[in-house]
Amino acid sequence: MATKKDLIEAQGFSRRRLLTAFTGGAPGGKELEPAKPLRAVIAGIALTVMLLLGGLFYGLIRPGLPADWENDRLIIATDTGARYISVEGILHPVINTASARLLVPSGTFSVISTDQGSLEGIEIGRSVGIVGAPDDLPSSAALIDDGWSACLPGGGKTVVALSAKPLSKRAGAGTGLVVRRGEDLFVVAGSRRYSVAAGQSSAILRAVGLGESGAVEVDGRWLDLFSPGAPLAPLEVAGAGDPVDGTSLSIGQVVHQIGAAADERYLVTEAGELAPISSLAYQLYLLGTGAVLGAEEEVSPADTEPLPNSDSPAGSADWPDAALRGLGADVTPCARLDTSGDEPKAVLGSTETELPAPSAGGTVAMEVGKGAVVLATGAGANSAGTHFVIDATGTAYAVPGGDLEPLKRLGYDEADVTRVPSAWIAFFPSGPTLSPGAAGATHDVEAQG
């Protein structure tokens, strides 16, 4: 058992050991440096400054509302996708971009991107806009103003293709196509369609050089792309066979003057004048009056000297001059829009390219991202028309009004507008009318804000 002396010595040893630990330094003789009390203070200050700068930077980059947001601005909440048009400090949900643009005067449209939190506390009004109007309008650089093609794949179907590189090319001069609409036959040549008289259709087609061409079935919309020409029918002359006073010639007779070119012929009209008759008109004459009076007769200049020249040709002035040739069996016939002249028109064309697939259930095939802005008019340079915007889906939206302000609100100007015959619009599905009045219409369901 430890004595009292042993306990006193043990306590003394413990005190000496503890004192040595506090005053003797680290093991190995290394002295411990006292901690610097300002180090923690400086670290705290630096962290505080970083937090303040971060908050300031977030405040700068966080999307908010500029000072002029209260009127005529399309405001998009990027985190929710909601969009509004601002009117006198009230945010109206807008159905689509086209409607928003129509509500803002031209030249002042702008978009503000923010987040939904920035809109808290702002009054939300009723939804506005045109149901079914487009969100994505083609840019001016994406507009196709020429070379539209309406091609005939067969079976009475039509594919209308709009692309930067036209699908079809114009048929050569003197080319024709026989088409059928129901029971009616037509010849299409150049920019015109000619109905073929029933009853003698086979003989007439042989007379115009297309007797061996099979008729392509078409619908009325395709035929309407072409301007109507005079019907192709046997050429009949009123008063045929009656003598012409002062000459040995008869009304309705076709004469060829000795020494003239082989195809230079004249028909003696009912008025006693000499009318030039083209090669094609002469073939139709042989089916009509010529079947009774016979073919051309050689005459001397003295025989025709008493007769004045007619101001008009025999037959119709818009008939082709000569017999036609077919397009060929290895091509697909098309109507091609030609806007290069004073008057836009459809001309006969063809393509050797495989036709693109039209939109589901439709007839229009649009190149991706392309569109058109057109003034669809009737015949004549002064014909009034209607503006249409055609988007990348091939949908045509009428833009009514006599001025360009609605189009300008949509981002277009006069140089973007192309005149086209109104018959082309019949192929495009119709969208709702685009007008500022329609865009401002409110809807029954009130937005929750």
Image (spheres, rainbow, N blue to C red):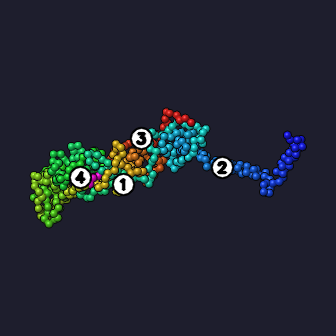
From mark 2 to mark 4, how far is it between C-alphas? 75 Å
Q: Residue at x 18, y 58 (%)?
A: 279
Q: Residues within 10 Å of mark 2 (few under 14, many from 20)?
A: few
Label 1 belongs to which residue?
146
Q: Helix or strand or loop: what does disc 3 sit on?
A: loop
Residue 330, image quadrant: bottom left
Q: Which mark is residue 432?
A: 3
**Real-space Cα separation, disc 2 to disc 3, in angstroms:** 49 Å
Distance CA(mark 4)–CA(mark 3):
37 Å
Q: Disc 1 vs disc 2: which is toward the camera?
A: 2
Residue situated in front as seen by the camera: 379 or 12: 12
In primary-sequence order, the first of circles 1 and 2 is: 2
Q: Position of residue 314 (x, y in %)?
A: 19, 55
Q: Which mark is residue 54?
A: 2
**Element under disc 1:** loop
Between 286 and 80, the residue placed more toward the observer is 80
Marked residue nearer the N-terminal end (1 or 3): 1
Residue type beneath disc 4: Leu
Label 1 and label 3: CA atoms lie apart by 25 Å
Question: Quarter of the image containing the N terminus?
Answer: top right
| Residue at figure coordinates x 55%, y 43% from the top left | 79
Residue 155 rendering spot, x and y as whole percentages: 26, 45
Which segment did they paint magenta? 331-335
Which label's residue is closer to the chain start, 2 or 3?
2
Label 4 belongs to which residue? 177
Q: Helix, strand or loop at disc 4?
A: strand
Say whether residue 162 is left or right of residue 13.
left
Select label 2 or label 4 by which is in front.
2
N-terminal label among 4 and 3: 4
Where is residue 52 shown, x and y percent of the image? 69, 48
At label 3, counting other C-alpha atoms closer than 10 Å, the crowd grade (few under 14, some 14-19, many 20 or more) is: some
User: Pointer 4 and pointer 3: residues touching (CB < 8 Å)?
Assistant: no
